Amino acid sequence: MVIGIDCHNLEGKRTGMGRYLSNLLREWSKLGVGQKFILYFKDRTPDDISKSSNFESKILKSKSTAFFVHCLLPKAAEKDGVDLFFSPSYILPLKISKKIRTAVTIHDISYAAHPEWFSWQNNILLRFVSKKSAQRADIILTPSEFTKKEILKHYQVNPDKIFVVPLAAEEKFRHYLSVDEKFGYCSFAGFEPESGHGLPAYREERRAKPRSRLAGANEESKKIIPELLSILNKYKIKSKFIFYIGAIFNRRFLPECIEAFKQIAKKFPEHQFLISGTNYTHPFIDIDYIIKKANEDIGREAILKTDYVDESDLVYLYNLADLFIWLSSYEGFGLPPLEALACGTPVITTKMGSLAEAVGESAIFINNPEDTKEISGAMEEVLSDERLSNELTKKGLKQAQKFSWGKTAEKTLEFLNHGQK
């Protein structure tokens, strides 16, 4: 079978949908000649695309994404004899040959369940075009049972064509740090004041206090010490920190998390809160202003904000963080909390949407994400209780091992072949 794939999300800086597809392609590249994939790009083929014999890359030059999706893709798919066309990101071409079966991945339908969270432009694009795609598709893939139920509720499609395939943390998201269970702390492996790396007080402080996220004494971790120090400096992190990464939506309660951190900032004067993500709030919330005011009230640059974290830095930031917080009232899966768990980082989240499917019982759960006292209490508990933090690390690592991209890719391909004659 020949599968054509819309790959334009792999171009440029990759968000969640691009990373989803790149992981599938990495696993599918190992299949050999038994399965052929035609990868369609809009501007260029990224350098990291496998040269596997079962991949054929084609560039359909277009300045317009809409023209690429709705005009160029269906023509190319028919010309190339594609048996099944796969869109990994919500939207199929509006018209495609009836000879070609279609599949679409719908990661969540928050735009249909809560249109008030999105601008009218996004409502048109996602709410209506995505619904049309779901209704016309032969196969719908979705990452959670929660999202499957939402699709059935809002789109009224045949349940027999919806297949649940959980996502996974990539293999690179792993636990570089080890906890000395006898003494209850970690330190930089081989890190000494005379080493030339600077921050000698960092080592002494971490030996004196139990909370630490830095590497245990093993040869692998010694190799990454300079890179860890460079990353801390790059994001203006002075010592310990709490971490959030992801697009910023109203449903993710960033103002409440900032207020909660402000409530404990004086009790934890060496901690900062690093927030990474582009602001997509609607109605608009001025997150930058809230951070500015919070830092003024705290009296230091305690809360840091960046729109984007380099992909190569992300695994280390997860590892270095004392705590990862990701509250949400609606998610299709919740990959960032699972990535944090895979890195051994304690997680605070909610059980709303599909998050419980991703993190199991390995996190601290907030019942009311609008209650800043509940959030600050959870933050304080994790940061001050070494035994709790270590227990969360162990549970998180065990939970993350239940998922793998190998399994995800295998099940996805199985379902793409579903009903094929």
Image (cartoon, rainbow, N blue to C red):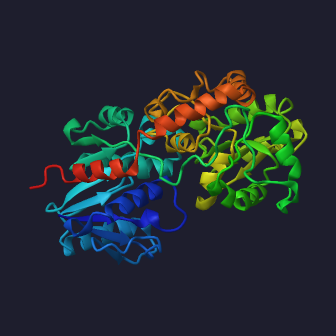
Residue 76: % across, % down: 26, 73
Residue 304: % across, % down: 76, 48
Residue drawn 70% across the image and 39% down it: 322
Left or right: where 165 falls relative to 185: left
Total numbered badges shown on the rendered structure: 0
Q: Examine the rendered structure and indicate whether residue 111 appears above or below residue 188.
A: above
Q: Is residue 69 visible?
A: yes
The image quarter containing residue 310 is bottom right
Question: In this orientation, which residue lies closer to the viewer: 28 or 136?
Answer: 28
Left or right: where 173 falls relative to 91: right
Residue 157: % across, % down: 24, 39
* The N terminus: image quadrant: bottom left
Residue 62: % across, % down: 42, 75
* The C terminus: image quadrant: bottom left
Residue drawn 28% across the image and 74% down it: 53
Residue drawn 60% across the image and 52% down it: 315
Left or right: where 29 falls relative to 388: left
Question: In this orientation, which residue lies closer to the viewer: 373 or 278?
Answer: 373
Q: Examine the rendered structure and indicate whether residue 101 appears above or below residue 11.
A: above
Q: Is residue 308 visible?
A: no
Spot the residue most to the right. Answer: 299
Q: Examine the rendered structure and indicate whether residue 34 appears above or below residue 150.
A: below
The image quarter containing residue 49 is bottom left
Question: In this orientation, which residue lies closer to the viewer: 223 or 345?
Answer: 223
Spot the residue most to the left. Answer: 421
